[in-house]
Image: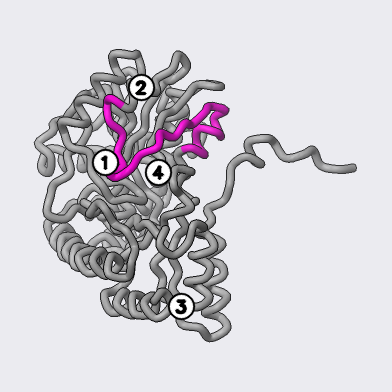
Amino acid sequence: MSLPPLTARAQDIQPFHVMDILARARALEAAGRDIVHMEIGEPDFATAFPIIEAGMQALRAGHTHYTPALGLPALREAIADFYSSRYGVEMAAARIIVTPGASGALLLALATLLGRDDELLLADPGYPCNRHFARFLEARARGIALGPASRYQLTAEAVAAHWQAHTRAVLVASPANPTGTLISSEALRGLYGTISERGGALVVDEIYHGLTYGCDAHTAAAVSDEVFVVNSFSKYFGMTGWRLGWLVAPTAFLPALERLAQNLFLAPSTIAQHAALAAFRPDTLAILEERREAFRQRRDFLVPALRELGFSVPVLPDGAFYVYAGCERFSDDSMALAQRLLEEAGVAVTPGVDFGSHQARHHLRFAYTTGMKRLEEGVARLARILR
């Protein structure tokens, strides 16, 4: 007896190339090599202690049972209060759905918006899981080629030019991965107007909010109650391993979203939710702001250092912790270049081919998610190889 063949979706969804880079980096480390990691999009700081302590207290108190599918009521209220205090946006806690990571929030939103062969418009370059989620739902993701002229962000004009009869939604990220660029509040309003006129939905990924440098990010929740807004406790709040995010959704979609949440994951992690209650405390936010300043210092070192080496960085990242750098001076194959830098320089970076197809072979993503001394060491190693 033999097993049935893999489904088409299972075969179509590709792995991250960066995971191959990471696996090789780990193998080299096991063999005694020292590797500077600039490939993984995960803050190097441990979760802030007030959050850890809140999680420990929850365990001691026996909070180990399921919460409601939409999340712990107290946490939903805390998130709503955060929108009020940080953005001046008032919203009902009932519109907030706590999810297993931002990935859970994206999957819920797209599952309510996309049917078979419906189309999702998104940026190219962009985070690869977004197009893979669309494929999982038997929908189609179409990347729109973007460059420095639009700061790698979708515009209302670009969406209008690419809209088709089967287009149902547009997904943007601000700050974006891999480019770190923001969308202004005016541009968000223009996008929403263009999409809503056509009967579509706008989904905005805001998981890097809080990690901006010299500017503030504007939440799409201020644009309209009908925008889907995704956020996460992973990046700014430093809770990657806790796997917790949230979705702000239009009221009309809440019953369907609750049914999906009940069936897809039942409930988010109870311990993580209790821990996240401490994420908004003043002492926690003070720690997170210190870390944001550390990321800013790293960005301000790395961007000019990469330019000096010969990489092109036409747009200064506004936020997140990435630099999307043109490597055309050195190679027209970003995967081959990333492998060479790992083997010869001991520096792990992400090839642009992970993020789409538009000029992807001519770009690398550098993550400044490691300390300044290690960044300096990484740049010195790159200089010895590339010069």
Q: Nearer the viewer, residue 272 or 100?
A: 100
Seen at 39% across and 67% down, the residue is 38
Say few, some or many: other residues with alpha carbon within 10 Å of mark 4 (under 14 / 14 to 19 / 20 or more). many
Seen at 45% across and 13% down, the residue is 165
Seen at 43% across and 32% down, the residue is 108
Q: Nearer the N terminus, badge 3 or badge 2? A: 2
The quadrant in which the C terminus is found is bottom left
Can I make out residue 68 in this image? no
Judging by the rendered image, the residue that carries numbered circle 1 is: 149
**In the rendering, at what x and y percent does residue 71 appear?**
35, 39
Amino acid type, label 2: Ala
Is disc 1 in contact with disc 4, using a CB cutoff of under 8 Å?
no
Q: Nearer the viewer, residue 349 or 135?
A: 349
Say few, some or many: other residues with alpha carbon within 10 Å of mark 2 (under 14 / 14 to 19 / 20 or more). few
Q: What is the spatial separation of the Cα atoms under label 3 and label 2, in whole angstroms?
A: 44 Å
36 left or right of 45 in image: right
Seen at 18% across and 51% down, the residue is 280
Q: Secondary structure at mark 4?
A: loop
Amino acid type, label 3: Ala
Discs 4/3, front: 3
Looking at the rendering, the stretch of residues picked out in magenta corresponds to 131-157
Judging by the rendered image, the residue that carries numbered circle 4 is: 126
Give the number of the disc on residue 161.
2
Judging by the rendered image, the residue that carries numbered circle 3 is: 345
Q: Secondary structure at mark 1?
A: helix
Q: Secondary structure at mark 3?
A: helix
> Looking at the picture, does residue 84 appear above or below residue 215?
above
